[in-house]
Image (spheres, rainbow, N blue to C red):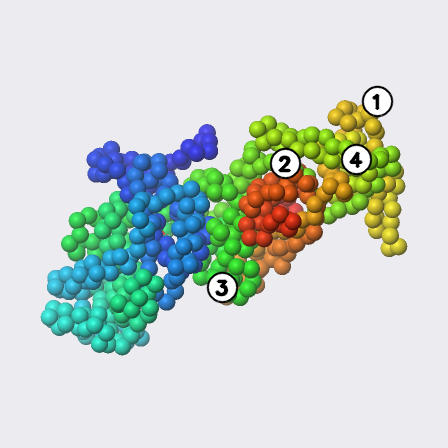
Amino acid sequence: MSTANTPVSNFIRTIIDADLASGKHSSIVTRFPPEPNGYLHVGHAKSICLNFGLAVDYQGKCNLRFDDTNPEKESFEYAQSIQEDVRWLGFQWDGEVRWASDYFEELYAFAVELIQKGLAYVDDLTPEEMREYRGTLTEPGKNSPYRDRSIDENLDLFGRMRAGEFADGARVLRAKIDMASSNINMRDPVIYRIRRAHHIRTGDAWCIYPMYDYTHCISDALEAITHSICTLEFEDHRPLYDWVLDNVSVACHPRQYEFSRLELHYTITSKRKLLQLVNEKKVSGWDDPRMPTIQGMRRRGYTASGLREFARRIGVSKSENSVDMAIMEGAIREDLEPRAPRVMAIINPLKVTISNFEGAEAREADFHPNLPELGKRAVPFGRELYIEADDFAEVPPAGWKRLTLGGEVRLRHSYVMRCDEAVKDSSGNVVELKCSIDHATLGKNPEGRKVKGVIHFLSCEHALPAEIRLYDRLFTVARPDADRDVDFSNYLNPDSLKVVQGWVEASVKESAPETHYQFERLGYFCTDRRDHKPGSLVFNRTVTLKDSWTREQA
Ligand code: ATP
Ligand code: MG
C-alpha cells in the first residue's frame, strides 16, 4: 500500500524513468506555464503538484513561466497571486520567474526564419474569410490567395506589421503547413496577430503578439524543458508543437505529454467561469472560501499538505479525472486530524443552569489526545453553561445517547449532568435547561450506572463570542457546467454560506489568522485570514468531521 508522500507511479514517471535509464536525459526540467489572467484553481493545483513534484522527486528543476501573450486579459495582480499560491503549496521554481514576453525578440526572429525558409506568409484574408477557407472536420480547407507571396514580400510585410503600419486585425502571419490536413490545427495556423494593447511587461513596445501554440513550444525549447506536460485538450496541438520546433533553429526539442484535467464535483474548474462568479458578485471575491481557487481553499482552511495529498490520491492519467468532493475532504480531514488542537465551541447555544453548583472551577485538558507537545488548557466550569441546542431532545429518537429530560450525559472533560427541567417560552420552544451534576463524577465513572453520551459545553462566564461561517458546496449538482444550454450559475447552492454567532473557549483568544482547530464534534475550523483578530474572532468551517453530506443526500 502506498502511504502519504510515496509517489504514485504514472505513465509520465514511466517515460521519465526510461529517458533517464537510456541516457536521453541526465536530469529533468519541467515547467508550470499559467496565463496570468485569473487566480489559480484546484485543477492548477493538480498541475503544480505534478510538475513541481516531479522536479522534487527526480532532483530536477521546474520553471514557473507566465504565458503572457494576451495583453488585454493579464495583470500583475494575477501574476503575484499565482506566485504566492505556488509557494504556499510548498514549491519553489528554479531561478527567476520567467515570462513568454522575455522571448518576444527571439520569437520574432524565429518567425523571420520561417518566412525565409518559405514556411510562413502574411495573409490579408479577413477573419470571416479565413474561417471559410479553413474547411471543417470533414472537408479540407483551401489555400489563401496570399499563400504564395514571395519571401521578400512576406519579409517586408511582416516587418511593417511590427512597425505598426497596419490596423489591428488587418493582417496575420501564418505558418505554411497544409490546408488539407485532417488536423485543423495544422491548416496554416496563425502565429502572429496585430493587436494594439498595452502589455503588462513590454508596454507599447509591440503591436504584434505571437499566438500561444507558437510561443509555448519555443519557450519550452529556449528553457531546455525535457518533459512539457499539459492537459489533454492540447493533444491535437502536439503536431504543431513539433512542426515549429522542427523548423526553427533551436538547440533542443522538448517532448509534450498530455494528461487529463481534474474536474471536481460540485464546483467548476475554469478561470473564465470563476471570474464570472466574481464579477457577478455571486461570491465575495476570488478568495471566497467557497471558491475552488487555491486562495479560496486556503482561506477556508484547506492545508497545503492536504492538497498535495489529494493530488497524490487522484493520480495522473489520460482517462477522465472526474473526482468526488469526498476525496478532497477526506484528504483534508486526515491531514488535520493528527495536528489540529481540539477545543470546544458552540454553534447553536442552549443555556443550562446547574442548580447544585456555585462559583467557578477549571480542569486541565490536553489540546490533543496524541500530541502532549501541544500542551494543555484550562476548561472552566460554572453555574451557567452553553450546550449545543441539538444535543437536547425532549422527545428523543430511538438510540438517543445525548441529553433528554431526566437523562444523564457526561460533559466533556467534566461532570456527569442530569437534566431536571426544560424551560419553555410562550410558543413552547425550549429556551433553557435546569440541570444538576453528580459531584462524584469529575474524571470518574458514576457509581452503579452507565452514562453513554458525551457532549461538549462552554462555561457562559468564560466563553468568547465568535462569528462562525459554515460553508457548504457552492453548487447543488455535481457537474454544474455540463449542460451548455443552462448557465452554471442557475445551480448555485443558496445555502452555501451560513453565518452564525456562536461561542468558543477562551484558549483560542490570541490565535493568529490561519490557525486550524478541531471544534470537538463539529468539524475542523480555521481562523479567517482576512477578518479574524483579537476581540473579533472569525472561524471558517473547513470540513465537517464526517462525510455527512453524502449520507444526507443518499
Ligand atoms: P482555465 O481553463 O481554467 O483558464 P487554463 O488551462 O486556461 O485553465 P492556464 O493558466 O493556461 O489555464 O493553465 C496553466 C496550466 O495548468 C496548464 O498547463 C494547464 O494544462 C493546467 N491546468 C489548467 N486547468 C487544469 C485542470 N482542471 N486540471 C489539471 N491541470 C490544469
Ligand atoms: Mg489557458
Mark toward the viewer: 4 or 3: 4
Residue shown at 62%/29% (left/top)?
A: 369
Residue shown at 21%/48% (left/top)?
A: 253
Residue 265 seen from this side: no
**Mark with earlier residue (2, 3):** 3
Residue situated in front as seen by the camera: 199 or 210: 199
Query: Residue under circle 2?
Result: 342
Which secondary structure lies at badge 1?
loop
C-beta proximity under 8 Å, tags 3 and 1: no
Residue shown at 12%/64% (left/top)?
A: 116
Report, in whole angstroms, how far the alpha carbon at label 4 lies from the one at label 2.
Answer: 22 Å
C-beta proximity under 8 Å, tags 4 and 3: no
The correct choice, above or below, for 464 with respect to 114 in the image is: above
> Does ligand 1 reach within 8 Å of label 1's beta carbon?
no
Report, in whole angstroms, how far the alpha carbon at label 2 lies from the one at label 3.
Answer: 38 Å
Query: Residue under circle 3?
Result: 276
Q: Can you name the residue that lies furthest to the top here?
A: 448
Q: Which disc number belongs to residue 448?
A: 1
Mark toward the viewer: 2 or 3: 2
The correct choice, above or below, for 538 with respect to 488 in the image is: above
Is 78 left or right of 372, judged from the image as shown? left
x, y percent for residue 68: 33, 60
Which secondary structure lies at badge 3?
helix
Residue 461 seen from this side: yes
Residue situated in front as seen by the camera: 19 or 456: 456
Q: Amino acid at mark 4?
A: Ala
Q: Residues within 10 Å of mark 3 (few under 14, many from 20)?
A: some
C-beta proximity under 8 Å, tags 4 and 2: no
Q: Which disc number belongs to residue 360?
A: 4
Report, in whole angstroms, how far the alpha carbon at label 2 lies from the one at label 1.
Answer: 31 Å
